[in-house]
Amino acid sequence: MSKRLLIAGFFSLVFLALSAYLYSQEEKMVFNEGVEQYGSGNYKGAIKSWEKLVSSGFVSPDLYYNLGNAFFKEGEIPGAILYYEKALLIKPFNEDIRYNLEIARSYTVDSFETITEIFFIRWYKMISLLITSNFWALISLILFVCTLGLLLIYLFSGKLNIKKFSFIVALFLLLSSLIAISFSYQNKVITIEKRDAIIFTPVVTGKSSPDESGNDLFVIHEGTRVKIEDELGEWYEIRLSDGNVGWIRSEDARKI
């Protein structure tokens, strides 16, 4: 019986490995198909091919960047901004992505007085995006385990110098572990919970409540970036960069 289980397990692993390989090859084929279409000036075809990869869950800053370029070539500014923003989440220090995003933003109608973030909060967010949330969590776990090891040395060592050294380093590693887990949480908030969105409807009116009977508070246009504060049914409560808050239909925006 155990022999049969081993054989079944072996073939299952082979099947999974083969499936992963074929899936990877299929992704490459679809991506290259989009590259060919983009190169020949068929930007709509490139968008269609690349959005298949996005729908399948494929994540790549190059894919997002190329999609942004294709949307920009088609004159679809909201789509260009959406995918440049997605690419920038993964590569926050990439100058090409940042430059193209600024060019795309220059085509939008709205220009709000932005409430500027304190510089160290902005850097904190950018550092959290350097690696994935899971990798930050792994670093935090490793540092915490090292902290426990040093505390054991502190408790059982008979030499004063070693006790002092292990205690000081343990405190440093514990602090580093807490910082790493905070980076992990911040990365998750930005990339997974997706609280920011891009307006896709040409003209949108912000309401005082999540229904059409609410008072009109402001008017915004396609391409504007907003922060989603709350969701209720088919409505998003959004905050603009100038601090104004209102409700819009969820169909009017796409999350980054």
Image (tube, rainbow, N blue to C red):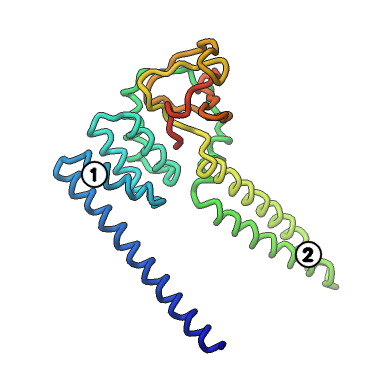
Nearer to the camera, 25 or 110: 25
- Answer with left or right where residue 252 lies relative to residue 48: right
Q: Position of residue 171 (x, y in %)?
A: 74, 55
Q: Quadrant of residue 141?
A: bottom right
In front of the other: 187 or 50: 50
Task: Please give the label number shown on residue 151.
Answer: 2
User: Residue most toward the left?
Assistant: 40
Question: What distance separates the C-alpha of mark 2 from that of mark 1?
Answer: 57 Å
Vertical placement of 101 versus 185: above or below?
above
Q: Which residue is mark 1?
A: 46
- Of the two numbered discs 2 and 1 in the rendering, the one whose residue sits closer to the viewer: 1
**Could you tell whether 71 is left or right of 10 in the image?**
left
Where 84 falls versus 141 (above or below)?
above
Q: Nearer the viewer, residue 101 or 120?
A: 101
> Does 192 sit left or right of 20 as displayed?
right
Query: Which quarter of the rendered picture does the N terminus lie within?
Result: bottom right
At a point 38% along the width and 18% down the height, the residue shown is 203
Residue at image x 43%, y 29%? Answer: 251
Position of 190 relative to 175 (above/below): above
Can residue 243 be seen here? no
* Image: 16 above or below 131: below
Q: Name the residue at 81% across, 66% down.
A: 154
Instruction: Tell me which label, 2 or 1, sits earlier in the chain.
Output: 1
Q: What's the residue type where badge 1 is placed?
A: Ala
Q: Which residue lies at the image location 40% right of the left edge and 73% below the top edge?
A: 15
At numbered mark 1, what does the secondary structure look like: helix, strand or loop?
helix
- Residues tagged 2 and 1 counted as in contact (Cβ below 8 A): no
Q: Around disc 1, counting alpha carbons within 10 Å, would you say few (fewer than 14), some (14 to 19), or many (20 or more)? A: many
Q: Position of residue 42 (x, y in %)?
A: 17, 41
Mark 2: which amino acid?
Answer: Leu
**Mark 2 secondary-structure assignment:** helix
